[in-house]
Image (spheres, helix red, strand yellow):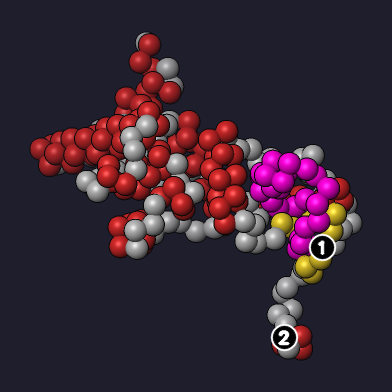
Amino acid sequence: MNSTNKSKYEKFEIEAIERGQIHDAPYNPRTISENARKRLRKFLAKHGLVSPLTWNRRTGNLVSGHQRLAALDALEGRNNYTLNVAVIDVSEKEEKALNVQMNNPSMQGEWNVEALQEMVFGDEINPEDMGFSSADTALFFGDDERFAEMFPDTPDAEKAKEDIRKVKEHREEAAERMKEEQSADFYFVVLCRDEKQKAALMKRLETPAWEQHVIGDVLSAALGLNKM
């Protein structure tokens, strides 16, 4: 490798360190559901660790990879193994910013659903092997009849598909009403501060984060207006 041509933006070194040197960041704001934890462990058991964790030499804290490390501990059945990690040396304040940035979905782009469908149906890659849950897959592929043959229905998947059905029905009804009334008085636009706020709001409303329409009844229920 020609080190003279190395990018000046590469700020880490790969080193082998003992597992005991790696401390979970006590402030880490990321959480994981039991379902996602099981899927992550299954993925690591099948494919292994294919990218390094990030560790801060100055504090000894793990910066990125907490869930993967926990899964590795479970698979290893011990915590005294050696691991290659990406080592950085930064202040605790910079470490905290990096901890969030490296796991922030709003900085990681969005899915091209058509490209995902080509992988599933063209390359015959099971959505489970991509790490998707049944509910995730219902959101992305629920309209395709082949979906039922590739992924079994579960309560989560059924709920996701039902949510999509309601949104589509509402969208169609709204479009038809607009044609009849030539008016937009029955809807309004909500402006969120950023993508994170929108994602939190849509989660609270139990509506897919990528959806641009929310059923009035759903919003009313969330605001407690249906009880008035």
Q: Is residue 188 visible?
A: no
**In the image, residue 68 lies in the stretch drawn in magenta:** yes
Please identify the residue farthest to the right as the structure is shown: 58
Q: Is residue 177 above or below residue 1?
A: above
Give residue 201's mark: none
Q: Earlier in the sequence, mark 2 or mark 1?
A: 2
User: In the image, which residues are magenta?
Assistant: 62-88
User: Secondary structure under badge 1?
Assistant: strand
Q: Nearer the viewer, residue 17 or 180?
A: 17
Quarter of the image where the C terminus is located: top left
Query: Mark 1 belongs to which amino acid?
Result: Ala
In the displayed structure, would residue 182 be above or below residue 53?
above
Amino acid at the residue labelled 2: Met
| Viewer can see residue 228 | yes
Which is more toward the observer, 120 or 199?
Answer: 120
Quadrant in the picture for residue 177: top left
Q: Residue at x 83, y 48 (%)?
A: 80
Per the image, the residue denoted by label 2 is 1
Q: Is residue 102 rendered to the left or right of residue 22?
A: left
For the residues labelled 2 and 1, say whether their Cβ atoms are less than 8 Å apart. Answer: no
Q: Is residue 111 left or right of residue 150?
A: right
Q: Is residue 41 magenta?
A: no
Q: Secondary structure at mark 2?
A: loop
| Residue with the mark numbered 1 | 16
Q: Foreground: 74 or 155?
A: 74
Q: Could you tell me which residue is drawn at 24 percent across and 39 percent down?
A: 168
Residue 193, image x, y percentages: 53, 45
Residue at the image point whose x is 42% and y is 56% from the top:
111
Q: Position of residue 173 (x, y in %)?
A: 18, 35
Measuring from the top left, give residue 154's x and y in whole percent: 37, 32
